[in-house]
Image (cartoon, rainbow, N blue to C red):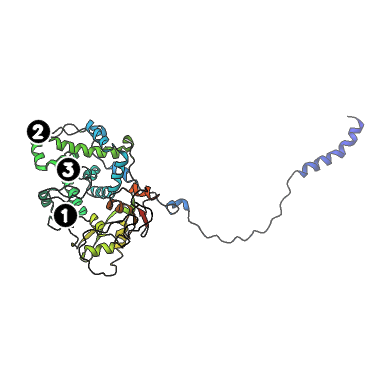
Amino acid sequence: MNVLNRRLLPALIPLFLTACAGNVPKPVPQQPAATVAPVEPVEDVAMAPKLLRPAQPADFWSDMRESFALPGCDADPKVLAWARTYTKSPNRFEQNVNEVLPLIVYAHKSATKHSVAGEFALLPWVESQYRHVPGAKNRPAGMWQIMPQTARTLGLRVEKNYDERLDITKSTESVMNMMRRYYDDLGDWRLVDVAYNAGEFGLKKKLDKHGGPTNDDGLPDVPMKPVTREHLVKLMAMACIVRDPARFNVSLPRRDTENTLQVVQVSSPQSLAQAAKQSGLSMNDLRDFNPAYRTTRGTVSSSLLLPKSAADQYKLGPVDAVAEAPEPVADAKPTVAKASKKSSKKKAIANDEPQIVFYKVNTGESLWSIARHHQVSVEQLMKWNDLQTQAVKPGQVLKLTAAR
């Protein structure tokens, strides 16, 4: 080391140490702790997600599929053949199902109550397409097509002015109770349908003679008439469509809770006219949900079956009393544009546009009841009126025909 370095080294060492010391962070002086205001406890939203968003509506058709007990679509070629026949016109099939969906839902609710296979909620489609068949003397009646003798066995009243075979509530309850009894005796849901169509006692005689079915995956191999076998095939075909609607190029309609049918208890006897006014329904619509009353002069003494909107209004209590009107021949019908301007019970509204029928919605009516009463489909009403949902309000004006 030369002389110059020896002279500079002692001077550089203190500088070097000072520079290193400068890199050490200086201690921060302690500040007095700030006073924090107490915070109110908040609910842990993760523990209650249902409070943050509405629950999604349950899929009715999924529930129905889970309740099925009969063999599936491939049980027999005739099942698929009838399923294709039913859905030959997909749009029309969808319209038909949508129009009777409240009745399907109601029948399935009763089937679930009695632990009956879900397919039997579709049985009225095979019997009557859910129509309230009036029935003549010694003929079947109602959407379940119950014979007079069977009605007596079930304890259903069949009278001149009142026929409980057409009472949706009582007939459905009786049929489902009978189906459950059949199954307890026969142990096979396929045979339950055979017994319903051909008679329980006749089937039991054949089973005693020929034995029970040996095939659990197809049609039961027991003697039966062709019409009875076809009855079972049709029921299985409807269930097949519900099982796999895409297979038949159809979409099953979504359940509208506003059209859900409810049983409403009647506190004191009242005329049909009073019940119609209290529920906000027309006489025709009231009787459509309660077809057991053969005339408009019937007296309601126990209960009524009403769509939810009408049931909610009925529960509010009687409206202002009105004089009892004579029995009407029929409710006034909507009129086409440029028709007479006389007022009608339906409050039809005229318009200058020719050949377009308009209708004003009454309190308690739904799009389904309007479509059913005027023999059009819900889809047509939605299309003609540019509706995105089936919800309608009293006073709303609807087109009942397509624009010309």
Whether residues under marks 2 and 1 lie with C-beta atoms below 8 angstroms apart, the answer is no
The amino acid type of the residue labelled 3 equals Tyr
Which residue is tagged 1? Answer: 164
Q: Is residue 230 above or below residue 160?
A: above
Which quadrant of the figure has residue 332?
A: bottom left
The amino acid type of the residue labelled 1 equals Glu
Disc 2/disc 3 C-alpha distance (Å): 19 Å
* Helix, strand or loop for disc 3: helix
Q: Is residue 392 visible in the rendered structure shown here?
A: no
Which quadrant of the figure has residue 319?
A: bottom left
Out of 15 and 225, give the one closest to the viewer: 225
> Which tag, 2 or 3, sits closer to the chain's start?
3
Residue at the right extreme of this rendering: 3
> Which tag, 3 or 1, sits closer to the chain's start?
1
Residue at the top extreme of this rendering: 1
Disc 2/disc 1 C-alpha distance (Å): 37 Å
Which residue is tagged 2? Answer: 210
Residue 254 point in image, percent of width and height: 34, 46
The amino acid type of the residue labelled 2 equals His
Q: Is residue 302 above or below residue 353?
A: below
Which residue is tagged 3? Answer: 183
> Which tag, 2 or 1, sits closer to the chain's start?
1
Residue 185 point in image, percent of width and height: 14, 43
How many numbered circles are shown?
3
- Between disc 3 and disc 1, the foreground one is 1
Q: Residue shown at 12%/57% (left/top)? A: 160
- Quadrant where the image shows the N terminus: top right
